[in-house]
Amino acid sequence: TLGTQTDYRDGEAQTDPYSPEYIVRSGSVPEILTLATLTWGRGLPAGQAEMEIIDRIREKHAWEAALPPMDSPSNIAKRLKMMEAMERKEWAYREEEIDKLQKAQMEVFKKLLQRREENQNELNAMRLNDHWQKHQKAKEEKMRKIQHDCALMLRKLIAKRKNWMGKLERRDIIREYNDFGSQTYAPLSRIGFFPDNNSDYYAVKNYYLNTFAGLCELEKSAPPSIFPMKIKAPKPKCIITKTGYIKRSGRLEVVLAQVHQ
């Protein structure tokens, strides 16, 4: 490792040396340094509060310059009195600042409480509105049912009044055919009419396909060329008696054979 040397200068690997932003000469206190902590949006541009802070700093510097030296007991006592007075003044200013801050916090707290109360009032109003809407719907539904029942009872009373002597009315055919809501056009099933009973009324019925005589005529009219095949009757799988019936034992044998397969 003693014989190893880099190809780069040591200065290229070094960081920049420390250089302060400003230099304060001995015996001088520049006033501009009191604004070093202020930035844009936090103290700058300077407002009324910042100007009051700058004036207080100037007053404090003037007070420090006016303090008597500590070369005699009388000057020391005078210096202590001035420092106590300045300390009381500082505490009074601090209390005033605390009061201002508490008042500002109270205003913010009041606004937050007012906003929360407004939001709660809006929420309560929405809930009351929903509750009122539900009650309105229930009320309308109840009124609709009452009106329906009232109309039904009125119709019953009118029909009962027409036949108040208990006599049967004669059938008015002209009126029934003139009214499309009558029993002639829309009969009720409770009086013995069932529309599904005549469901095959409109079905197509062919004489040549639905009747044996029609099939015989259709066969006679057909040419013999369409009947070339001969159909043989299938042999029964069971034993048939002389009368043409199948015994129960034969049917059971067929079932057992199928189960065996």
Image (tube, rainbow, N blue to C red):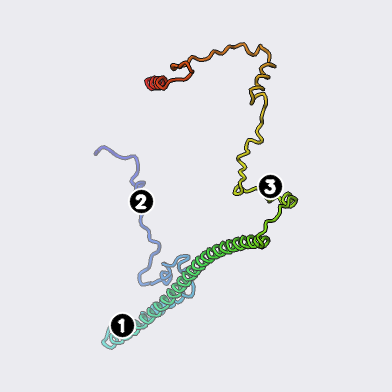
- Say which element carries label 2: loop
Q: Residues within 10 Å of mark 2 (few under 14, many from 20)?
A: few
Give percent across and percent down for residue 158. Answer: 66, 62
Percent position (x, y) of residue 113? 45, 72
Tell me how many marks there are.
Answer: 3
Q: Is residue 165 left or right of residue 85?
A: right
Residue at the left extreme?
A: 2
> Dot 2 corresponds to which residue?
15
Q: Which mark is residue 69?
A: 1
Q: Is residue 134 visible?
A: yes
Q: Secondary structure at mark 3?
A: loop
Amino acid type shown at disc 2? Thr
Taking 244 as reference, is 54 above or below it?
A: below
165 or 154, which lies in front?
Answer: 165
* Residue pictured at 51% horizontal, 65% vertical: 131
Task: Give the residue type at disc 1.
Answer: Pro
Instruction: Report, in whole angstroms, how far the alpha carbon at label 3 lies from the one at label 2.
Output: 107 Å
Q: What whole-number distance in Å separates the C-alpha atoms at marks 1 and 3?
A: 126 Å
Name the residue type under label 3. Answer: Tyr
Report x, y in % for residue 6. Answer: 32, 40
Above or below 104: residue 8: above
What residue is rendered at 49% in x and 70% in y? 121
108 horizontally vs 140: left or right: left
Q: Of callouts 3 and 2, which one flags the residue occurring earlier in the amino acid sequence?
A: 2
The residue nearer to you, when weighing 54 against 228, is: 228
